[in-house]
Image (tube, rainbow, N blue to C red):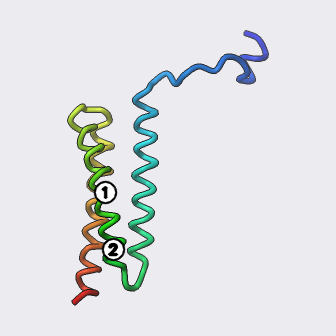
């Protein structure tokens, strides 16, 4: 074993597990959406237009997560992420309905 292998220099190939990369990208998307939902939820008077945009983006993420569940690619992680997003969207929806009336 040469010093280049010990220090990590050498040929860099593709990721060994393409599913892992896919899960990592989806996790990044979910975390970004979760952050946007939390930011809107911290507002005293959340905006209905922002909520509609978040809902549209959440629907796209739900479709991806549902496909992961059906294909059984990290299904437990996908279920957990989907339920967490739904709870956050429900809380934000209740807060907006309360402010509108």
Observer-nearest residue: 19 or 58? 58
Mark 2 secondary-structure assignment = helix
Q: Left or right? Give the position of 94 relative to 26.
A: left
Tally the marks: 2
For label 2, the crowd category at 10 Å Cα-Cα, with few meaning under 14, some 14 to 19 and many 20 or more, is: few
Give residue 13's quadrant in the image.
top right
Q: Where 34 falls versus 77 (above or below)?
A: below
**Residue beneath label 2, please?**
49
Distance in Å between CA atoms under marks 1 and 2 = 14 Å
Q: Left or right? Give the position of 11 relative to 58.
A: right
Percent of width and height locating residue 78 = 30, 44
Q: Residue at x 67, y 17 (%)?
A: 11
First in sequence: mark 1 vs mark 2: 2
Q: Residue at x 33, y 43 (%)?
A: 77
Mark 1 secondary-structure assignment = helix
Q: Where 93 falls versus 75 (above or below)?
A: below
Q: Where 22 falls versus 66 (above or below)?
A: above
Percent of width and height locating residue 18 = 43, 26
Question: Are dots 1 and 2 in contact, CB under 8 Å?
Answer: no
**Residue beneath label 1, please?**
58
Q: Left or right? Give the position of 10 relative to 23.
A: right
Quadrant containing the C terminus in the rendered view: bottom left
Percent of width and height locating residue 46 = 36, 79
Q: Nearer the viewer, mark 1 or mark 2?
A: 2
Q: Residue furthest top?
A: 1
Q: Residue at x 46, y 48 (%)?
A: 28
Q: Where 19 falls versus 90 (above or below)?
A: above
Q: Residue at x 45, y 56 (%)?
A: 32
Observer-nearest residue: 65 or 4? 65
């Amino acid at each position: 074993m040469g010093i280049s292998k010990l220090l990590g220099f050498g040929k860099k190939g593709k990721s060994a597990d393409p599913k892992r990369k896919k899960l990592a990208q989806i996790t990044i998307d979910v975390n970004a959406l979760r952050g946007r939902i939390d930011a809107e939820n911290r507002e005293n008077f959340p905006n209905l237009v922002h909520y509609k945009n978040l809902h549209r983006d959440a629907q796209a993420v739900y479709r991806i997560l549902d496909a992961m569940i059906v294909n059984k690619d990290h299904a437990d992680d996908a279920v957990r992420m989907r339920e967490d997003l739904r709870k956050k969207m429900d809380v934000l929806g209740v807060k907006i309905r309360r402010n509108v009336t």
